[in-house]
Image (tube, grey):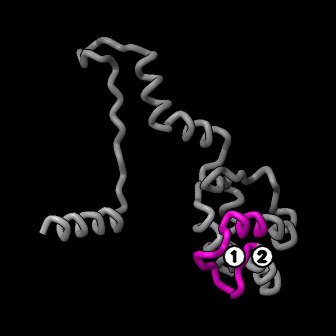
Amino acid sequence: AFRKSLQQLIEKLKNANAHFIRCVKPNAEKVPEKFMSPMVMEQLQLSGLMGAVQIRRSGFAIRLTFLDFSQRFLIILPRGARQQVLAAAGSTGVFITNSVDVRKVSQEIFAVLPTVLGPDFSTDDYALGKTKIFLRDSLSRVLEQCRHL
């Protein structure tokens, strides 16, 4: 019964679109009107909030995993280029499967985008992280428009 209940809870959490509120404690004693800057700064750094702020300040408002980016924007490439991108990433078919290196697919998509987008594309409009791709809003809009053509 416990395992079944736990499994149901895990499924609900996976399906939920959860938003989290981060609480920052201003002091160790939790008393009003007392603010300890080093303690607050440490909490902000450890929570990853400072990194998120830095990314946003550099203008990269859109964040996608390599898999999400590849699945979303591979379609805007011409058919021949799509097949070459997938082959370069280890695919034997025309779909992104578990055996495909999605980071490689994303890099290959970016290599082809100048020919697809022309002057609307700039290498300054995106950055590759360890697990995510960061896009400027302008590039994201252009890519979305291409998807809907």
Residue 92: say if magenta: yes
In the rendered view, does 120 fall on the left or right side of 25? right
Seen at 66% across and 68% down, the residue is 102
Residue 41: say if magenta: no
Residue range (magenta): 89-109
Q: Amino acid at mark 2?
A: Val
Location of residue 111 with respect to 39 vertically, above or below: below
Dividing the picture into quadrants, the one containing residue 16 is: bottom left
Tell me the residue that label 2 is attached to.
85
Q: Amino acid at mark 1?
A: Leu
Seen at 63% across and 66% down, the residue is 69
Seen at 60% across and 42% down, the residue is 56
Examine the residues drawn in magenta and state their main secondary structure. loop
Q: Position of residue 29 (x, y in %)?
A: 25, 15
- Camera-side residue of 142 and 89: 89
Dividing the picture into quadrants, the one containing residue 52 is: top right
Location of residue 33 with respect to 72 vertically, above or below: above
Mark 2 burial class by Cα count in 10 Å: few <14, some 14-19, many 20+: many
Q: Position of residue 135 (x, y in %)?
A: 67, 55
Q: Secondary structure at mark 2?
A: helix
Dividing the picture into quadrants, the one containing residue 62 is: bottom right
Q: Nearer the viewer, mark 2 or mark 1?
A: 2
Disc 2 to disc 1: CB gap under 8 Å: yes
Location of residue 146 with respect to 40 vertically, above or below: below
Number of the label disc, if any, that sits on residue 74: 1
In the rendered view, does 9 fall on the left or right side of 97? left
